Amino acid sequence: MDARTHAAVETAARHALWGRLVVVALAALVVLLVLRTRRTLRALLGGPASELHARIGRLGRGDFELPPLPENTPPESVLARLNRTGEQLRQLATQQRRAQAQLKLAAGVFTHAREGIMITDAQGLIVDVNEAFLRLTGYRRDELLGRSPRLLDSGHHEPAFFDAMWEHLRRDGQWHGEVHDRAKDGSVFVVLETISAVRDEQGEITHYVTLMNDITRLKEQEQRLAHIAHYDALTGLPNRVLLGDRLKQAMAQAPRRGQVVAVAYLDLDGFKAVNDLHGHEAGDRLLVALASRLQQTLREGDTLARLGGDEFVVVLPDLADTNASQPLVGRLLRAAAQPLPVGELNLQVSASVGVTHYPQAEDVDADQLLRQADQAMYEAKVAGKNRVVVFDADQDRALRGHSATVESLRQALVGNEFVLHYQPKVHMGSGQVVGVEALIRWRHPQRGLLAPGQFLPAVDDHPVECEIGEWVIRSALAQLAAWTDAGLSLSVSVNISARHLQQLDFIEHVAQALQRHPQLHPNQLVLEVLETSALEDMVGVSRTMAEGARRGLRFSLDDFGTGYSSLTYLRRLPVAELKIDQSFVRDMLDDPDDLSILHGVIGLADAFHREVVAEGVESEEHGAVLLQLGCTLGQGYGIARPMPADQLLPWVQHWEPPAAWRHQALLRREDLHLLRAKVEFGAWMRSLELYLLGRRELAPALDVQETWAQSWLRATAGDDALGGTPFLQRHARLLLLAHEALQLRAVAPQGLAPEALEALQAAHLRVLELLQAQLRAREVAASRWL
C-alpha cells in the first residue's frame, strides 16, 4: 500500500470515528432532553399521569369525593387544581340535592295542605290551586286555571273592600282578613284569607299566593249563639242582654231629644197556680200567648223583653213626659188580665207592674232603672196585685239606708263570722277530683248559717264587697296550702265581683296572698268572673286578666251563656275555663233547646281551646249526657254538695263516680239529633206520668209521639242496632198502653195509683233500651275519657 493510499485510509477511519462520536453525542443529548422534559411534566402535573387519568375518570363518573393529595403536592399543579374543582363540584351537587329536597317538600305541602292554596300571576289570573282549594270551592282545576278569582265573588263585599285589599297588598305585600266567597254550587262560605306577594330579584311582583282557612262553621255557630244570647228561647222576645242594649240606647237619646223613657216591670199574678194545676207545658204555652198579646198593645219602637219565668220588662221611649206612659202601661195591664185560650183550657192571670222614668234628678244607669222598676213591681204585689205602682225616687233615697246591713257585714268580717265551704269539681270520666270552688257562708249569731244570696246583695258594688273578697282569697289559699301539705293536689276557685276585679291593685294583692304560701303554684288559684261582669268593662277586665296570666294565675268565665257568649270576647279575654250556667245543665234532660245550647257552648270552648265545666250536675243522667256531648268536668249536687273544709279529704278518699260515667263514650256531632230525640221522648213520658198521677191538668198528645217515632226511624235508617220492626212494635205497645191509661184517667179525676203505671213504665223502658242501644252504636270509643 502506498503512502497516499495509507493516508486516505487513515483519513477515512478518522472521519468514521468522528461520525460515531457525533451520533453518540446526539443520542446522549436526546436522552438528557427527554429526562428533563419528564421531570418538568411531572412537576407540572403534581404527580404521575396515571393518577391524573384516574381522577379525571372518577369526576367523569360523577364521583366528586376525590382522595386527598400528598402534602408536598404543588398547589398550582394540575392535580391540585383538579382536586379543588372536584370539591366545588361536590358542593354544587350537595346544594342541588338540597334544592331538590326543598322543592319536593314545598310541592308536598302545597298538595296536601288542609288550607286552600291559590297562586295567581302578577295580573291576578289563577296559575295553580291545590286539592283543598278544589274541595272548598267545588270547581275542577281546568275550570279555574287562567281565570280571575272574581268568579268566587259572593256579592257580600262592596267594591271598596277589594280596592282597599289591593291597595294594602301593593303597599305592604300582604293582606289578612275574612272573605265571603261563593262555591260552584252557589253556596256561600267564609274563609280567613292571607294573601302574600312574591317578588323577583329586581323587586317586581311576579305572583300572589293566597291561603284560605274555612271558618264557615265557626261563623254559623257564632250567629246561633248570638241569637241564643239575645233572645228568649221560649217566647222569641229579647232577653236581658238585648234589653240592656236597647234601654241604654233609649237613655242616650232621651236627653238629646228632650223626651222621657219609661221602664215597666211586669210580674204575672197567679202564674204559679197555673203551673201547679195544669203543668209546665200549659204554663209555657200561656207565656207564649201572653207575650204575643202584650206585643200587640205596644207601639213600633217599644221593646218587650222576657227576663225569665213570668217576668217581663217593657221599654217605652220617646215620651213627651212621665204622664204619657200611663195609657200605654194601662193597656199592658188590661191585656195581661184578659183570659187566654190554651188548648182546651181557658186560662187567666193578671200582672203587677212597676214603672220608673228617665231622666231623673240623680244620674242613674240602666241596671238601676231595672232595679227601681222591680222594686215598684214588688210594691204593687204587696198592695194587692193587678195594679201599677210608679217608682218614687224621693222615697227611695230616704229608704236607701241599708248602711246598718253593710256595717253588720263589716263587723262580721272583723269578728271572724264568715266561713268557707267547698264544692268539688271532678273529671266525670275518670273520677279524678281536679279542684274545688270556695263558697262563703255567714255564721250569723241569731239567724244561723246563711247562704251568700242572703247577705252579699247588700254590699253589691260597695267597698265592703272588696274586703270580703280579699278575705275569701286569703282563706281559700290558706286551706289549699294545708291540703297540699297533706298530699292532696288540686286547685281552688274563688268568685270575684266586678268591683273587686276592677281595683287597680287587685293582681298585686292576689300575688301577695300567694307569696305567703310558697308550696302553692299560682295556677292552683282559679279566679271566677261572671260573664256579665266581664262585659261591663271589656278593656279593663282584659288588661287585668292579662296581667294575672303573666303571673301564672288562671281565670274562669262563670255562668257562661247568660251574656253575649261572643267569639270576639273569647278571643280578647285570656280565660282558661268556661263554666256553663247551671240553668242550661239542669234543664237539658227536659228541654231539647237547652241541650242544643250546651252542645254549642261545648263546641265553642273546644274551638278556642278552653276547658269547659258544667255546673248543676244533679244526677247520674246529667253526667252521662254531658260526657256524650264532650264535657268531662262537672260540679253539682249530683256529685257533692258544698262541705266544710274538714270533710273534703275524707270525701275525696271515698269518692267514686257512677260506673256508667266511666264507660260513657262521646257522641258524634252528626248524631246529636238522636240524643235530642231521646230527650224529647223522656220529657213526653214524664209529662204523661205526671198527668196520669193527677199532678198536672193537661195530657200530652199521643199523635206527637207517632210523628216522633217516624222521625227517629228516618234518622237511623240502615242501622242494625235499632231495627225498624222491633222499634215500631215496642213503640206501638207503649202508645196502646198510654191510650188505655188515658181512658182510665178520664174517669179518675184524682189520678191513677202508681202501681197502675207499671206496665206502661215497663213498655217505656223497653223502647228506651232500643234508643240507648242506637246511641251506644253511634258513640266514639270510651277510651276518650281515660
Image (cartoon, rainbow, N blue to C red):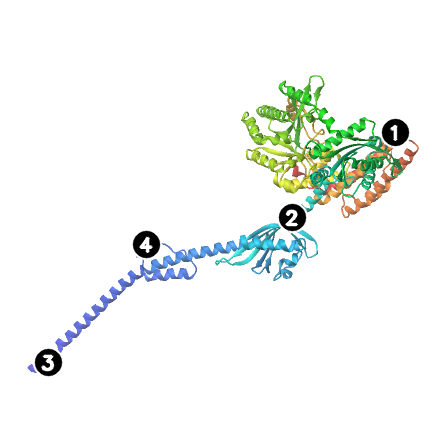
Going by the numbered disc 2, the residue's amino acid type is: Ile
Q: Give the Cα separation between the discs numbered 1 and 4.
A: 111 Å
Going by the numbered disc 3, the residue's amino acid type is: Ala
Q: Nearer the viewer, mark 3 or mark 1?
A: 1
Judging by the rendered image, the residue that carries numbered circle 2 is 215
Name the quarter where the C terminus is drawn.
Answer: top right
Going by the numbered disc 4, the residue's amino acid type is: Pro
Q: Is residue 5 above or below residue 468?
A: below
Going by the numbered disc 1, the residue's amino acid type is: Ala
Q: Classify 10 Å Cα crowding around label 4: few (below 14), some (14-19), many (20 and above).
A: few
Q: Nearer the viewer, mark 4 or mark 3?
A: 4
Q: Is residue 242 above or below residue 440?
A: below
Q: Classify 10 Å Cα crowding around label 3: few (below 14), some (14-19), many (20 and above).
A: few
* Residue 256 on image: x %, y %: 69, 40
Which of 254/468 is in front?
Answer: 254
Name the quarter where the N terminus is drawn.
Answer: bottom left
User: Which residue corresponds to the image point at 51% horizontal and 54% vertical from the top-left?
Assistant: 101
Q: Give the Cα separation between the discs numbered 2 and 1.
A: 56 Å
- Asked if the residue at tag 1 contacts the one at tag 2, i.e. Cβ–Cβ closer than 8 Å, the answer is no
Q: Give the Cα separation between the discs numbered 2 and 3.
A: 124 Å
Judging by the rendered image, the residue that carries numbered circle 3 is 8
